[in-house]
């Protein structure tokens, strides 16, 4: 195997190792192996660097600052290949055939400006920067929190574009089907608000635009890592608008930018303060933070004025306090019509706070009861719309405070409310009127990670009704679904790109503690359009406020210094 192929093999297989560890963690089992050590042993003589980079990927970092790493005793002491000599890493870097200081030379690891990368992550950053330079004045970013008018800003630009060019070819897309559907609906609402101010033809041009997932936009190919549209076959649109860009990882951002024609405009829309992508890196946040860079000068539009939430109370006030890290008084929200913060504390040693405080609270019973409304809706679309009035949000999928337990508790409560003990009993792995969320892309069925649907029994058959990115509802045999969960509750990560009238947010006592950050709390809170209830132990709430996501990346630095 040549160096190029060997490098690609090792880089591509890192995700396999990390997935194995992630699976072990999700199953709440002790990993029998250290996947970072397994990966590192591929690189004889350079194990210390390989281990360091692999372990940093797990916390979302795509590179490491060599000097910071070597000076952080706690970090390098965790590296089994360093033992008690951190200087060994520096020696390995200088001598190893796996390392290059010239990024043009294909090696598994790149050292540039004092930062070490896996080759592929450095390449993604390089492609993103090169494409921003290629697009020039056609590249734009709009960032701001919910209610700051991002959609209206785009809507007015579409009016302007269609006025000058009625036949303009426009593409709308988002990372998930739900986010795409919400984008289309938001533009419809915008047109309705302007119906007496714009020509009917222009309004129709905007409302008739279809929104889709980024995968579908780029032309996903079954059993292939390549898309139909790329740098050799670019997208046939005059204007490309992508929403919820904070969810996009480096690899997908690079592929998206590669596919946009240099004569086309690209608008990236998102909230820089939300959670970053599931995969390593924080591309959109890096781009926004580097807005003063010559390459991005005048291309980053920051929306600050909030039209939905008042800044002096409720969701608007709390979201700002979270981001600023200045929240310290839950009592100040007593009597607030938008936000209820219920601090839960143990009355007895060993008391299970989730069962004794959360599930037995009036808040839980009140919000869980709201779900009973959708069951009586004959229309599947109306039922799905009704479901979106309320959502329970959790930090984790498993353990006491996780999605699985909360879903069970809601089902149990609804049995009591409706008075039928049998209607929530799974038979073929699902049941009549079960709300579900798709957890993995299935391109054969055309259902995608994050899509929300409803199981209904018709005759002897169970059908899964899923809402598409275009806002339409279609059915597929429920037995065909392989990857789904009950969706009364979902993780905050899964909720990105969605909004609900009411949100019930549960923070864990200890489980999932490492996930508690400002960005997580902010994202969960801002999923609510009208009202949010937060139930949390005081320590968990405080940890969210104090801890911000810190992902090492070279993109911001490179934009500001190249």
Image (cartoon, grey):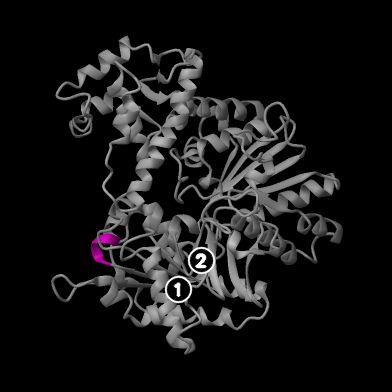
Q: Return the residue at label 1.
A: 338
Give coordinates of residue 119: x percent, y percent: 45, 23
N-term-proximal mark, 2 vs 1: 2
The residue sitting at 31% across, 15% down in the picture is 93
Give coordinates of residue 420: x percent, y percent: 48, 87
Q: Is residue 145 magenta?
A: no
Q: Is residue 206 above or below residue 289?
A: below
Left or right of 553? Residue 309 is right
Main SS of the magenta part reads helix
Q: Return the residue at label 2.
A: 309
* Mark seen at residue 266: none
Circle 1 residues within 10 Å: few <14, some 14–19, many ≥20: some
Left or right of 177? Residue 306 is left
Q: Is residue 307 above or below residue 378?
A: above
Q: Nearer the viewer, residue 93 or 34?
A: 34
Q: Nearer the viewer, residue 418 or 508?
A: 418
Instruction: Specify whether residue 101 is in view.
Output: yes
Instruction: Specify whether residue 303 is in view.
Output: no
Give coordinates of residue 230: x percent, y percent: 67, 31
Q: Nearer the viewer, residue 232 or 485?
A: 485
The magenta segment: 537-541
Helix or strand or loop: what does disc 2 sit on? loop
Left or right of 342? Residue 445 is right
Asked if marks 2 and 1 touch (Cβ < 8 Å), the reply is: yes
The residue sitting at 45% across, 84% down in the picture is 415
Within the image, what quadrant is residue 314 found in?
bottom left
The residue sitting at 21% across, 33% down in the picture is 78
Q: Nearer the viewer, mark 2 or mark 1?
A: 1
Q: Is residue 538 magenta?
A: yes
């Amino acid at each position: 195997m040549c160096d190029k192929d060997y490098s690609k093999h090792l880089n591509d297989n890192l995700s396999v190792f990390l997935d194995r560890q992630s699976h072990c963690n999700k199953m709440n089992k002790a990993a029998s192996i250290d996947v970072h050590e397994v990966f590192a042993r591929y690189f004889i003589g350079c194990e210390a660097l390989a281990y360091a980079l692999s372990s940093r990927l797990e916390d979302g970092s795509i590179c490491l600052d060599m000097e910071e790493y070597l000076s952080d005793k706690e970090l390098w002491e965790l590296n089994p290949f360093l033992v008690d000599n951190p200087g060994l890493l520096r020696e390995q870097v200088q001598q190893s055939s796996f390392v290059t200081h010239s990024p043009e030379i294909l090696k598994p690891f790149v050292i540039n400006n004092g930062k070490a990368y896996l080759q592929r992550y450095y390449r993604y950053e390089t492609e993103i920067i090169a494409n921003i330079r290629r697009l020039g004045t056609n590249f734009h970013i709009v960032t701001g929190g919910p209610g700051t008018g991002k959609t209206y800003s785009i809507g007015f630009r579409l009016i302007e574009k269609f006025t000058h060019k009625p036949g303009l070819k426009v593409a709308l897309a988002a990372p998930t089907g739900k986010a795409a559907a919400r984008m289309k609906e938001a533009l419809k609402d915008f047109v309705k608000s302007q119906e007496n101010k714009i020509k009917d033809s222009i309004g129709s041009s905007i409302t008739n635009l279809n929104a889709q997932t980024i995968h579908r936009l780029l032309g996903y190919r079954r059993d292939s890592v390549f898309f139909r549209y790329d740098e050799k076959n670019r997208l046939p649109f005059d204007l490309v608008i992508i929403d919820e860009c904070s969810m996009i990882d480096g690899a997908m951002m690079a592929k998206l930018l590669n596919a946009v024609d240099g004569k086309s405009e690209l608008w990236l829309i998102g909230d820089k303060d939300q959670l970053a992508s599931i995969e390593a890196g924080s591309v959109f946040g890096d781009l926004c933070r580097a807005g003063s860079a010559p390459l991005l000068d005048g291309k980053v539009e920051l929306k600050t004025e909030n039209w939905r939430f008042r800044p002096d109370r409720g969701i608007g006030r709390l979201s700002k306090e979270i981001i600023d890290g200045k929240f310290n008084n839950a009592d100040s929200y007593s009597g607030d019509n938008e936000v209820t913060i219920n601090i839960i504390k143990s009355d007895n040693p060993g008391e299970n706070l989730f069962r004794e405080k959360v599930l037995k609270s009036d808040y839980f019973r009140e919000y869980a009861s709201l779900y009973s409304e959708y069951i009586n809706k004959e229309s599947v679309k109306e039922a799905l719309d009704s479901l979106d009035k309320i959502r329970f949000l959790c930090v984790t999928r498993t353990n006491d405070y996780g999605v699985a337990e909360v879903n069970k508790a809601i089902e149990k409560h609804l049995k009591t409310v409706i008075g039928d003990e049998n209607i929530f009993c799974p038979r073929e792995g699902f049941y009549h009127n079960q709300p579900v969320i798709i957890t993995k892309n299935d391109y054969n069925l055309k259902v995608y990670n994050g899509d929300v649907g409803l199981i209904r029994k018709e005759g002897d058959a169970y059908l899964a009704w899923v809402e598409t990115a275009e806002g339409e509802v279609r059915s597929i045999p429920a037995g065909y679904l392989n990857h789904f969960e009950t969706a009364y509750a979902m993780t905050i990560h899964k909720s990105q790109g969605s909004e609900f009238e009411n949100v019930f947010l549960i923070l864990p006592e200890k489980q999932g503690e490492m996930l508690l950050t400002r960005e997580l709390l902010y994202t969960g809170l801002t999923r609510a359009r009208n009202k949010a209830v937060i139930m949390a132990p005081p320590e968990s709430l405080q940890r969210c406020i104090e801890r911000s996501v810190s992902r090492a990346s070279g993109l911001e630095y490179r934009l500001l210094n190249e």
